[in-house]
Image: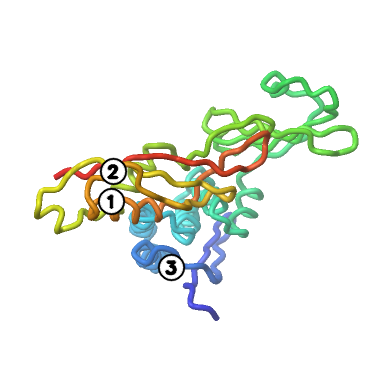
Amino acid sequence: MNNTTMKLKILLFSLFVFFAIGSRGQNLKSQLFADEGISHLQLGNFAKADSLFDIALSVYPNVDAYFNKALTRLNMKDQCGFCDNMYMAAFYEDVEADSLYNKYCLSKSMMLISPYDSLVPVLPDKAYERIAIDKCGKRETIEFYNQKDSLLATLQIINKKYYYSKLSYKARYPGGTEMLDKFIANNMNYPKEAADQNIQGRVYASFVINEQGKVQDARIVNGVHPLLDEEALRVIRMIPKWYAATSKGKPVREVMTLHVDFTL
């Protein structure tokens, strides 16, 4: 067995099913809260477990916390909460979460003509569509196929925003700017020496979001002081996975710039 933690997965539909599987650890502080939440989940203390998973996720998007928060929400009879958190666990590459989300959270159908046709450019070779709609109405995926069953294009609708596979769009952080700002605020430690000297300011930094949505090559563009600059870089390098930018439907690298404010 490797040094990653074990996570208990408890799936309730008609019955409670309890089983444990291996999981990968992430940020240590987040993982400690996630582990404590799993302990309460095992004991049936769902409200306590839910709050601990929230704390874990405020520190770092921990796969264990997302997965087990989904199961906690299911035990609390919150189907949408189950689906939302299972979707995020799948986004962070948990294979079983992806399978469960697709099995229990999506309504799938195949149509020759649908209302989605008006949302995309003309596809003269289109023969039919495969439609997958999140049961809580937050996500829809429409795939367009020709008569040879070859995929022509994909339309994604996430929280009423449209992403069409043949178009280009910028990298985006799950949850948007608000969640990114929250992540930075929750993980930033004001350097004591800088605070003692009343050093404040706004640090500008750039970094690359690669084709897999990972942060790379962070550097200072306009710094304030070495103490603040280094802390800004530390937090930026911690930022978890993004939705990668695309060009004509293919993931591409994108250079991002953001600022980190240090105020006393």
The answer to which quarter of the image holds residue 180 is top left
Marks 3/2: CA distance?
44 Å
Rendered view: 10 above or below 190: below
Q: Residues within 10 Å of mark 2 (few under 14, many from 20)?
A: many
Write the residue at 58% across / 36% down: 139
Q: Which residue is mark 2?
A: 203
Label 1 with label 2: CB-CB less than 8 Å: yes
Where residue 127 appears, as percent x and y from the top left, is 85, 29
Residue named by callout 3: 42
Name the amino acid, label 2: Val
Quadrant where the C terminus sits is: top left
Callout 2: SS:
strand
| C-alpha distance separating marks 1 and 3 | 43 Å
Tell which of 76 and 123 is nearer to you.
123
Tell me, yes or no, if residue 202 can be seen here.
yes
User: Residue 126: x, y in percent?
Assistant: 83, 27
User: What's under tag 3, amino acid-wise?
Assistant: Gln
CA separation in Å, label 1 and label 2: 6 Å
Mark before the other along the chain sequence, 1 or 2: 2
